[in-house]
Image: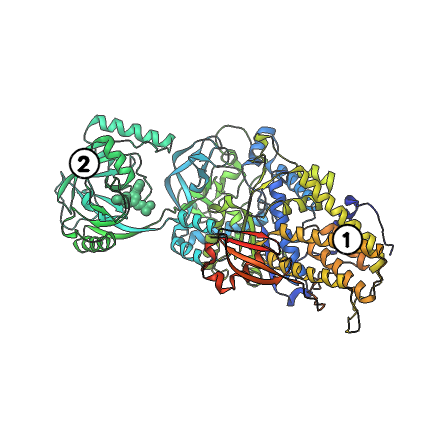
């Protein structure tokens, strides 16, 4: 083989050479025979919607995942690293309406061009496992799950108020309404009354919440968002008798009572009015005047066009209820800030101790009674919303809030005026969409038999092609006669097909299960043994914008499929990494801001490795990445230097034996020892980072430093005519190979080339290649370091030279003299480090 020397780095040639090599050899195919005995590692990035173009955010997401996957392969893992396309959804349909193209064709074209782009970036995917969710071979199984969940009562239909986007002409799940606006187009979401299909995610509310604690590898912020979204609160539901009616004993919820939900039973003596939502079922009945009825209509209308409740508004109904605890009559108001679909849609208002109630009471001049005495040190201002000691509360005076809640709940249950309840903010997941480009819902409506599910053997129910697209606001499926007309599976008579399709979040709730199936001609969605082998996903990487929707739905789906006996697993994602955004001039890259950098252009100019190196080097994954042209050039220059170093030293090392054994007789050059020692520390550090923290930038910069050391050393040995023996050369070759392998997860093309140049053979990933640390008997020089805490000298410690601040801090914290002041590591605000001299710990 010809060894190339001193050749300029030709990324086009090198990158296409290795991409072709990988494809030809199916290098990244998961689960080959040899890898059977290896430990598994399942790594995925959130799969893209095929919009047509890869953007910088994708590149970052996939470069992170690829680095992790490639590292794990070097470490001897059998890695599953697939990609697919989340290909149902609105843009295809909008393009169809605008350009009269077929959504299927549009999607296929986009998938084709994005696949080309992904391959051009050299990501190590097992392409044979790819999924395209708009293929009937994929959504067929989703339809099957739908039918099975329907049978189990996990899917149901009901008329409900749904969030509606007029401009997208579709319903939106609660999670898809952000600040009252449609998450896709940003137009105001409104409310509409429609019959809808729902997944009963609330059946799993408790489990979804409890299992969050076990998600040790998830970022806290995502866990908090899910907890808040599920929003469990335990409290008391109380029945307030309506004053005019003569209520029977032992009231239950009926027309004579208003049921409220409170988490602050301790404040019941301060409840001076009841507030109900405008859509409350009793509203019309409670309102005594015609003006009130008009007022109500107005408020309902307003709540439909805007969910903004910043300004508290309402009116008195004319009715009263009895507060059973005080025996007093209190007025009932309709109030815009009471939510219809939370709790019971009615509240007892305690203006002294609740902010919204206070604002409302001030505005409408309603009595305010203080019933909680603030704890010491807390101000006396109203509203006082925290806990304290009860006052003005009859028999309950003197108790703490906690005690009083217990006693009042018990009292309410004993006397039948209330019951303890647990409420969740989480609502069932409405999945009906009035769109064409989605998975058809496999049911028909028969005049005789009603709503009838299709037979499982009739699946897939294929989405028809060649439908009419126009902007008239009904779904294209509704206009497609051949689709609508169906035969009833029960009576064989005429039936009308469901024309709603499923929310695209259904497809993304189980694609990571489908990836595990190697042979797609198999007539199963996935196999139990594959699920058991590969799942849970060891590392899932994606944007934090999916913290509630996708990540919660997927958890639900896995639990539901588990209960359908598909497998035993409880949770799909063991470790989650949410990467930051790519921003330019402080703003997220977007067409509307005109600050988009096109990955294709960069690749053309600098090559894929440069683009990958830049996105990994410029910021730790969880942080936002600020675009910087000169850092891109910096990455390019580094790769050039790396390549030149490798090509120019190849001749000196190529013939060094692979299995050379250093013996005691070998005298190793002191500088070689030093550099090998440094390498050892970097291998250890890199390994640690690659196993979880993923601060790739520190690995990359240490490798850069090491490469410089190596170049300096070579220059010196040439200048000083130093003769290197076999052992030296062996170690230097090991050094260069180690740098190649450490960098391989980030810049795989040039590293594959470099490996070939140095070793005259291809990298074989079936072997465990990650470099082992070699000990040459060298121990670094030592120095004395002054350790200060908040600027005061506390100890003088001895350490090896050139440690970084992290390592040094560990040593410093072992000193009892320092520990006296820094009892807990969480106290540390920052450290100031003067290399080899001083460490100041600021607490
Ligand atoms: C009396 C009270 C006194 C309350 C007090 C709070 C403070 P979470 O924790 O979110 O469950 N609430 C109940 N249903 C509501 C609805 N449909 N719309 C708006 N607010 C509603 O909140 C429970 C509290 O939120 C309940 O406790 C109720 O107000 C209010 F000093 O009842 B509270
Ligand atoms: Zn029928």
Mark 2 or mark 1: name the one nearer the start of the chain: 2
What mark, if any, has residue 367 been given in the picture?
Answer: 2
From this view, report whether residue 306 is shown above or below residue 666. above
Give the residue furthest to the bottom. 664
Rendered image quadrant of residue 467: top right
Q: How many marks?
A: 2
Question: Residue 754, position in %: x, y?
Answer: 77, 54
Question: Is residue 207 shown left or right of residue 678?
Answer: left
Q: Residue at x 79, y 51 (%)?
A: 645
Q: Quadrant of ligand 1?
A: top left
Question: Is residue 59 shown left or right of residue 301?
Answer: right
What mark, if any, has residue 404 been given in the picture?
Answer: none
Q: Residue at x 37, y 48 (%)?
A: 231
Relative depth, front residue between 200 and 782 = 782
Question: Residue 442, position in %: x, y?
Answer: 49, 46
Q: How many angstroms separate mark 2 from mark 1 (CA)?
A: 83 Å
């Amino acid at each position: 083989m010809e060894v190339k020397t001193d050749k300029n780095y030709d990324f086009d040639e090198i990158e296409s050479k290795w991409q072709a090599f990988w494809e030809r050899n199916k290098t990244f195919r998961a689960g080959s025979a040899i890898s059977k005995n290896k430990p598994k590692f399942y790594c995925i990035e959130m799969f893209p919607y095929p919009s047509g173009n890869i953007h910088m955010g994708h590149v970052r997401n996939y470069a992170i995942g690829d680095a992790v996957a490639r590292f794990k392969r070097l470490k001897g893992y059998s890695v599953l690293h697939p990609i697919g396309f989340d290909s149902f959804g609105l843009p295809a349909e909008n393009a169809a309406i605008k350009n009269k193209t077929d959504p299927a064709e549009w999607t296929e074209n986009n998938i084709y061009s994005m696949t080309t782009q992904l391959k051009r970036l050299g990501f190590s995917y097992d392409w044979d496992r790819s999924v395209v969710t708009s293929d009937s071979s994929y959504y067929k199984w989703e339809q099957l799950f739908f039918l099975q969940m329907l049978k189990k009562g996990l899917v149901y239909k009901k008329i409900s108020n749904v969030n509606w986007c007029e401009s997208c002409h579709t319903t939106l799940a609660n999670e898809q309404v952000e600040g009252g606006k449609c998450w896709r187009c940003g137009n105001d979401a409104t409310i509409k009354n429609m019959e809808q299909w729902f997944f009963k995610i609330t059946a799993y509310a408790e489990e979804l919440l409890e299992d969050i604690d076990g998600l040790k590898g998830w970022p806290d912020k995502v866990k908090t968002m899910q907890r808040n979204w599920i929003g469990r609160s335990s409290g008391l539901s109380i029945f307030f008798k309506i004053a005019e009616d003569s209520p029977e004993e032992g009231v239950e919820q009926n027309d004579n009572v208003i049921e409220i939900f409170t988490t602050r039973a301790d404040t019941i003596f301060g409840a001076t009015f009841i507030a109900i939502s405008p859509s409350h079922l009793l509203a019309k009945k409670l309102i005594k005047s015609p003006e009130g009825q008009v007022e109500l209509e107005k408020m309902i209308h307003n709540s439909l066009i805007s969910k903004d409740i910043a300004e508290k508004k309402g009116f008195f109904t004319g009715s009263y209820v009895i507060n059973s605890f005080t025996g007093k009559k209190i007025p009932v108001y309709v109030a815009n800030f009471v939510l219809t679909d939370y709790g019971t849609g009615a509240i007892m208002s305690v203006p002294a101790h609740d902010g919204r109630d206070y604002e409302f009471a001030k505005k409408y001049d309603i009595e305010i009674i203080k019933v909680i005495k603030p704890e010491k040190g807390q101000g006396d201002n109203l509203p006082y919303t925290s806990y304290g000691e009860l006052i003005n509360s009859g028999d309950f005076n003197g108790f703490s809030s906690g005690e009083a809640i217990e006693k009042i709940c018990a009292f309410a249950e004993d006397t039948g005026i209330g019951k303890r309840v647990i409420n969740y903010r989480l609502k069932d997941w409405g999945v009906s969409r009035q769109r064409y480009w989605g998975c058809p819902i496999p049911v028909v409506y028969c005049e005789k038999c009603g709503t009838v599910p299709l037979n499982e053997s009739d699946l897939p129910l294929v989405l028809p092609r060649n439908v009419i697209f126009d902007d008239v606001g009904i779904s294209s499926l509704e206009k497609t006669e051949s689709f609508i007309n169906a035969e009833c599976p029960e009576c064989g008579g005429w039936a009308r097909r469901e024309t709603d399709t499923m929310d695209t979040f259904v497809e993304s709730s189980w694609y990571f299960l489908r990836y595990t199936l190697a042979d797609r001609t198999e007539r199963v969605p996935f196999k139990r043994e594959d699920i058991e082998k590969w799942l849970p996903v060891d590392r899932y990487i994606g944007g934090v914008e999916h913290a509630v929707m996708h990540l919660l739905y997927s958890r639900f789906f896995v639990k539901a499929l588990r209960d359908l006996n598909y497998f035993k697993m409880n949770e799909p994602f063991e470790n989650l990494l949410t990467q930051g955004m790519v921003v330019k001039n402080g703003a997220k890259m977007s067409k509307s801001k005109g600050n988009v950098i096109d990955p294709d252009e960069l690749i053309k100019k600098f090559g894929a490795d440069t683009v990958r190196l830049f996105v990994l080097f410029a910021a730790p994954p969880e942080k936002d990445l600020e675009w910087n042209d000169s850092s891109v050039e910096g990455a390019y220059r580094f790769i050039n230097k790396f390549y030149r170093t490798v090509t120019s030293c190849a001749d000196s090392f190529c013939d060094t034996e692979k299995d050379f054994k250093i013996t005691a007789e070998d005298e190793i050059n002191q500088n070689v020892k030093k550099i090998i020692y440094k390498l050892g520390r970097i291998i250890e550090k890199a390994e640690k980072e690659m196993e979880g923290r993923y601060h790739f930038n520190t690995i990359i910069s240490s490798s850069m430093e090491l490469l410089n050391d190596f170049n300096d050393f070579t220059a010196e040995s040439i200048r000083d005519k130093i003769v290197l023996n076999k052992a030296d050369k062996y170690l230097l070759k090991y050094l260069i190979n180690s740098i190649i392998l450490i960098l391989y997860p980030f810049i795989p093309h040039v590293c594959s080339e470099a490996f070939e140049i140095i070793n005259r053979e291809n990298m074989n990933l079936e072997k465990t290649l990650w470099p082992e640390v070699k000990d040459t008997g060298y121990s670094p020089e030592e120095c004395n370091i002054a350790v200060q805490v908040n600027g005061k000298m506390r100890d003088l410690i001895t350490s090896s030279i050139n440690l970084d601040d992290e390592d040094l801090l560990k040593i410093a914290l072992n000193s009892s003299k320092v520990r006296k002041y820094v009892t807990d590591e969480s106290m540390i605000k920052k450290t100031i480090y003067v290399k080899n001299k001083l460490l100041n710990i600021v607490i």
